[in-house]
Image: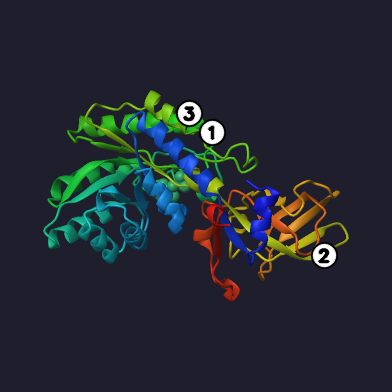
Amino acid sequence: MFNSQVVSGLEKHETPFYYYDIAGLTANVRACEEASSKYNFHVHFAMKANFNRRVLDVIQTAGFGADCVSGGEVKKALESGFSGKSIVFAGVGKSDAEINLALDNDIFCFNVESVQELEIINELAEKKGKRASVAIRINPNVDAHTHHYITTGLDENKFGINSWDLPKVIDTLKASKNLEFVGIHFHVGSQITDMNVFKSLCVKVNEMQQWFEERGVAIKVLNVGGGLGVDYHHPDQNVVVDFESYFKIFNDFLDVKPHQEVHFELGRALVAQSASLITRVLYLKHGIKKNFAIVDAGMTELMRPALYQAYHKIENISDLAFSKELKSYDVVGPICESSDCFAKEIELPELSRGDLLAIRTAGAYGEVMASAYNLRPSIRSVYSDEI
Ligand SMILES: *Cc1c(COP(=O)(O)O)cnc(C)c1O
């Protein structure tokens, strides 16, 4: 991703900023489109991973739909040119105003996370004289084997409806004239790299659809969510994600009937490798055992390390040739929090004030989580085809 020409282009920009590799993003999105269309699978892009205008443009050319988790995202999806009919809307706490916005725009489907939410959507749809398409988000009790903050599919979790509440769901659906039940939805977590998790998910989905059909409830849509992980350790070797293997698992293990559609909601896998956070070394401080590199980006620009102890590979792109001796550094930001740390004790070619660092694989849950804490200015973006 980085060569001396790119770095001299980046030198002209004020740091910190996100640097987007538009060609890499396009190749990855295209790979996903090709692998999914082989099986007629429908992909929705999880907008919460990244809603940068340029990123959404690339996603849209692939013809993907949008997966939204707030009214703000539904609005942004519509403004960005996604059709209402391509939008799925999940979230445990949809407000009345958010539900009304989605009803007004005839979205493809609400992914409903509680029995009470079903009743409220029915009520609000009735007031508008509409029928709302709903899928039930079921808690599959599948362990995603990932960080506990990004595991969502276990029983003791705020997301989804637990299996013991399903009889009540069926009663509610039967009593709700303004709901059209389209199917079942699952999302087990994020950054899943163990493909067995998706096999277990398929088994669960098969069990669940059988349960519904035994009770005379037909299922049209099987929405298996997202969660496919990326390689944070080797960003250059794995710019394009192995979508072929991922979709093949669902083709092999999911019991799909001829009238059914399979939907996916991918976020991270589509965009994570497309961006790096570029930051400049401000100061070097030498402790007794440690060297600190204090950089001009912080948790306000990229929160994942502070929030989930997430690993991001860091490179000294001012010394691409590794001409200097390797030294150990803690790379920390300027924010007044001890958790404002990008990496501990990593080896980098010796740093000097002014060196540029690339914090890799920052295209998902990076720019979108930026905050103004400490009154930081809003984060800028630079694109590979504009430098
Ligand atoms: C966040 C989210 C996704 C996307 O997750 P990734 O790990 O980024 O693929 C999909 N579906 C729902 C309901 C989500 O909340």
Q: Nearer the viewer, residue 238 or 211?
A: 238
Disc 3 target residue = 245
Beta carbon of the mark 2 residue lies under 8 A of ligand 1: no
Assess disc 1: are there few (<14), some (14-19) or many (≥20) residues with their C-alpha within 10 Å of its C-alpha. Answer: few
Answer yes or no: disc 1 within 8 Å of ligand 1.
Answer: no
Residue type at tag 2 = Lys
Name the spot of residue 94 as percent of width and height, x first: 32, 60
Select label 1 or label 2 by which is in front: 2
Depicted 349 relative to depicted 381: above or below: above
Q: Quadrant of residue 125?
A: bottom left
SS at mark 2?
A: strand
Give the residue at x 67% y 51%: 5
The crowd level at tag 2 (other Cα within 10 Å; few <14, some 14-19, many 20+) is: few
How many numbered dots are placed on residues in this image? Answer: 3
Residue at image coords 66%, 68%? 337
Residue pointed to by mark 1: 194
Q: Position of residue 285 (x, y in %)?
A: 82, 65
The answer to which image quadrant residue 375 occupies is bottom right
| Local secondary structure at mark 1 | loop
Q: Quadrant of residue 372?
A: bottom right
Of mark 1 and mark 2, the one earlier in the sequence is 1
Q: Secondary structure at mark 3?
A: helix
Disc 2 target residue: 285
Residue type indicated by callout 3: Ser
Q: Is residue 121 left or right of residue 339?
A: left
Instruction: Locate residue 167 relative to residue 195 in the image: left or right.
Output: left
- Could you tell me residue 80's position as x and y percent? 35, 58
Left or right of 24 on screen, residue 123? left
What is the three-letter code of the residue carrying label 1? Asp
Going from the N terminus, do you reach mark 3 or mark 1 first?
1
Q: Earlier in the sequence, mark 3 or mark 2?
A: 3
